[in-house]
Image: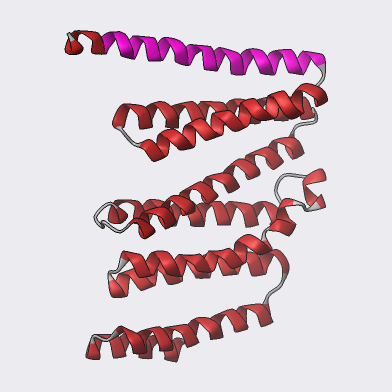
Amino acid sequence: MIVFAVGAFLIFRITQRREPFYIYAGVGIAMLVAATSAELKGATLTIAYAIESGIISLIAYAILRDIKIAERISLLLIGPVILSVSSITSRAWLTSVIHKDFFVLLILALTLLGLGAFFLRRVKEVEDKDPKQLNATLLVVGSAYAYILLWLSLHAGLHNDNTAVMVSLVVYTIIGLICYFYGLANGKNGLRLYGGALVGFVVGRLILVDVWRMEIAGRIVTFFLIGALLVSTAFLGRKRQNKSLPDNA
């Protein structure tokens, strides 16, 4: 694998042609995947795949300086994402917080968010929409893993499921509102839509799921806290509107 990777780099430097680079790099990646599958299994395999996929994407960008290719190579993370399903549904979450499945979700969240953050500034420099969409996907999926990790960790660490649900939904609401108003204030429609979708998810879950499952005390406290957060946004929006009136006049 190392020989093919070095050969791909040298061929690209000498000839400045990408076709041989793709061939040699593809063979090297295939060898790395085969070796990883043969030597590792379970959660360790998923973690190794995630780290390797992230590093390969960064190396591709460092060599080629092409954000489009680096973003497409990051699609290798689809493999670890599929393998991580067993970690999300693992029975280990019933007994403790810190275990191998915890680190699977943590590494995946950090890898996806790290790649998305690294490519974010560079994506803004290109006019093509494909890299921007792929970068947004990295950030959204990475944040989803962070939310799942928070949800599972709170349910595993807290004895009261109602408290875990309440804390999780309140955190989701705060993050959603921050993203929504930051995107609204700075004209970032993607971030505004993301925040609105996250808040909509919280409200929808409260109405369709948690209102029937939670005990009356937990239901009251949860609805009160989230309701207070949502009502406070009306005052923020009104204050922002009042500030813009003199300019419009």
Across and down, in percent, residue 41 comes to 71, 72
Part of the protein shown in magenta: 216-243
Across and down, in percent, residue 48 comes to 59, 69
Q: Is residue 10 above or below residue 166?
A: below
Residue for point 43% across, 84% down: 25
Across and down, in percent, residue 194 comes to 47, 37
* The stretch drawn in magenta includes residue 226: yes
Q: Is residue 48 visible?
A: yes
Q: Which quadrant of the figure has residue 44? A: bottom right
Q: Which quadrant of the figure has residue 101? A: bottom right
Residue for point 43% across, 57% down: 134
Residue for point 69% across, 14% down: 221
Of 162 and 231, nearer the camera is: 231
Q: Which SS does the magenta portion mostly show?
A: helix
Residue for point 34% across, 66% down: 68
Q: Is residue 47 visible?
A: no
* The stretch drawn in magenta includes residue 101: no
Drawn side of residue 175 relative to residue 162, left or right: left
Drawn side of residue 4 relative to residue 228, left or right: left
Q: Is residue 246 above or below residue 6?
A: above
Q: Which quadrant of the figure has residue 73? A: bottom left
If the image is split into quadrants, where does the C terminus sit?
Answer: top left
